[in-house]
Image: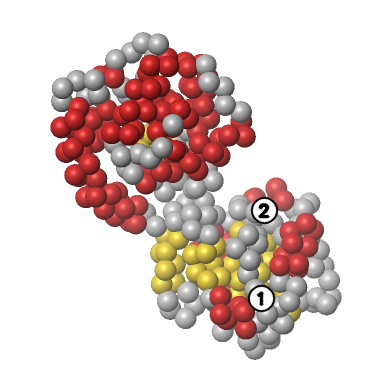
Amino acid sequence: MSTNKIEEASRVLEALGMDAERSNERSALTLLALLRLRPDEPWSTAADPMLGTRAIMDWMRDEYGRNYAANTRETIRRFTLHQFAAALLVQQNPDQPDRPINSPKWNYQVTPQALAVIQKYDTPEFDDAVTDYLATVPGLKAQYAAAREMNRIPVTLPHGEPFTLSPGGQNVLIKQMVEEFCPRFTPGGEVLYVGDADAKWAYFEADRLAALGVAVDEHGKMPDLVVYLPGRDWLVLMEAASSHGPVDAKRHRELASLFADATPGLVYVSCFPDRREMKKYLHQIAWETEVWCAEDSTHLIHFNGERFLGPYD
């Protein structure tokens, strides 16, 4: 019986325009989990709970006997759920659209429009419902995209250029780093790179970095913010501690290697929202680096060394 339901789910996904990868057994089981649909239940009873990836995998195991290994969680996210979201079969975090992308509470829910069609499967109304649904998807995508755009974080660079970051997470802190740290501690500096959990390179002056000897590899673990001080010939490499953690000894080595060919001197700064958060990482912070807390934005904490906010040979 469970096999029949999985095959039916594959046919539903095919009808909704999914390709072979998004209508295989893994994707069919993902759909059934999102619908909370057991093997012996009719499609008309499909529901739309908000579920994280772990809960989806637990449902596959408990109701359909498919026990996917924990390390396949990323496969389900990257090769099924992301495409479901892109096709507007599911929406992400309807309860909190600005949820950080790395939050353990990240969840998925079948959209109301898709659910209404799916509940008609195995009835005479299904084919017409699919046709109507597919005709409305482009407009629905535009509506959902506009809603997501409204939740983005506006950021203004020191020279006045605006851009946006995806909502939540460390990006709230990155906004403070750009708008509060830079005017105080790197006046006249050029922002050359701003990272974003949603789109890795939110702001990226590749040619300017290349002129300074920095060839950025797509797979290199860039800091969250890179600022060049032309008057001092410094590159200030800043980490929002909620993404990679602070600049500890390991991260210091990684950044030194990544920027090994840079002609300016390198300055390393760990950034925290407040000293309470900093306290969690205090034992990890590398010597000869700086620390900045957004709640005390006019002050820096210097971790030893003979220089204050400067590069070391």
Report crowding for label 2: few under 14, some 14 to 19, many 20 or more residues within 10 A (C-alpha).
Answer: some
* Residue 104, visible in the rendered structure: no
Residue at position x 47%, y 74% from top? 157
| Depth order, front residue of 227/116 | 116
Q: Mark 1 belongs to which amino acid? A: Val
Q: Amino acid at mark 2?
A: Gly
Instruction: Of the two numbered discs 1 and 2 on the same chain, state the one appearing first in sequence.
Output: 1
Image quarter hosting the C terminus: bottom right
Q: Position of residue 40 (x, y in %)?
A: 36, 10
> In the depicted view, which residue is nearer to us: 73 or 66?
66
Q: Residue at x 48, y 54 (%)?
A: 198
CA–CA distance in space, label 1 to label 2: 23 Å
Q: Name the one closer to the observer, 13 or 232.
A: 13
Q: Residue at x 24, y 36 (%)?
A: 113
Choose mark 1 or mark 2, whichever is in front.
Answer: 1
Find residue 245 and name its label: 2
Q: Nearer the viewer, residue 190 or 141?
A: 141
Circle 1 residue:
214
Residue 216 figure quarter: bottom right
Name the quadrant containing residue 251: bottom right
Would you say 128 lies left or right of 229 here? left
| Quarter holding residue 220 | bottom right
Q: Residue furthest front?
A: 20
Residue 140, how many percent across, how many down? 24, 47
Asked if residue 86 lies left or right of residue 291, the reply is: left
Q: Is residue 158 visible?
A: yes
